[in-house]
Image (cartoon, coloured by chain):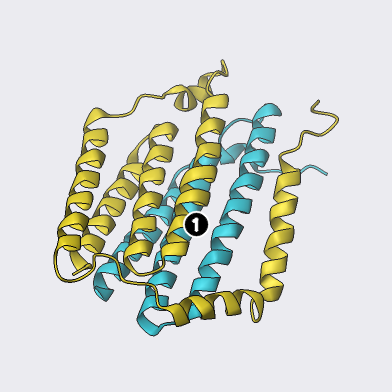
Chain colours: A yellow, B cyan
Amino acid sequence: MTLWAVILAGAVAAAFAGVMLFSRSLYVSAVCLLVVLLQTGLIFLLRGAALLGFLQVMVYAGAVMVLVVVTIMATGGEPEAGFARFADFSFPRWLAFAGLAAAACEVALTLYLGGASSAPVSPADPAMAAGFSTALFSSYALATEAVTLLLFLAALAVLPDKEAA
Amino acid sequence: MTSAVWAVTGVLFAAGLAMVVLRRQLLAMLLGVELMLAAVNVALVHHAGLFSDAQAMAAVAIVIAIAAAEAVVGLSLILRVLRAGRGVDAGGLSELRG
């Protein structure tokens, strides 16, 4: 029964990806990407990967997209003519209403499925969760360490250097 | 279910690839890369659910972390390029300078 919820989330994600592709405003593109990432997080949740869904929402839709939007806004005040696309912070009303309507439909569908006999969200398999943690710290241990180092280096990348200061 | 998820994955990846190829703004290209990574994550999670493959879920967690680091480094590079006055388009970055 999660099929219709997955299809709805996927359709919304695909529609907003299309808007993101054809919109000239970078701000609209960034907000559309935020909606796409939220929908993919919902698909993760519906497919039984709750931890990955929360990671997707917190890391991607939370931290990274805030960084992107703040970067666009920070560069929006530049006077050069080529920066006009950065300074456009208007968002189409019909798109906002479409996103809100889709969110309301998804909530209603989830509540309806929750009231039905089958669960709206596939329950996480305990063996799968154990295998996930085992894989992360055994066969993927080197990759996990490398990613940790990469995140540390990424934190260094945002520090201002002496010349810029 | 499977065909629907594969269709969503394909559409999202194609849209991200088109953004990287067709648009010239550096930030738009970065957003396209993020979209492609999200599409790959959807495919991996669906694969993990189909075959109870915990390795695929671990791969998704690593991809999410790598994507976050890539976004931070990419945004800092774009800001540095903007401060250097080399424009917002990828066309202005055709030469390397040592």
Look at 65% across and 34% down and name the residue there.
B79
Classify residue A99 as left or right of residue B96: left
> Count the marks: how many?
1
Q: Can residue A126 be seen in this view?
A: yes
Label 1, on which residue?
A55
**Nearer to the camera, B44 or A1:** A1
Closest to the observer, B83 or A164: A164
Occupied quadrant, residue A23: top left
Question: Callout 1 environment at 10 Å: few (<14), some (14 to 19), or many (20+)?
Answer: some
Which residue is painted at 69% across and 34% down in the image? Answer: B80
| Residue A31 sits above or below residue A129 on the image | above
Rendering coords of residue A53 (x, y %)? 42, 59
Residue type indicated by callout 1: Leu
Say if A75 sits above or below A33 in the image. Answer: above
Residue A18, percent across and down?
31, 48
Residue A40 position in % (x across, y down)? 37, 57
Mark 1: secondary structure:
helix
Instruction: Check the picture and name the quadrant holding the C terminus of chain B.
Output: top right
Give the image location of residue A160, x and y in percent.
Answer: 77, 33
Horizontal side of A102 relative to B50 (left or right) equals left
For the N terminus of chain B, the quadrant is: bottom left
Q: Nearer the viewer, residue B81 or A29?
A: A29
Q: Which residue is drawn at 14% across and 66% down?
A: A116
Task: Report the chain holding disc 1.
Answer: A
- At 70% from the left edge and 60% from the top edge, which residue is drawn? A148
Query: In the visual, does B78 lie left or right of A68?
Result: right
Residue B29 visible in the shown view: no
Q: What is the residue that sits farthest to the right in this orientation?
A: A162
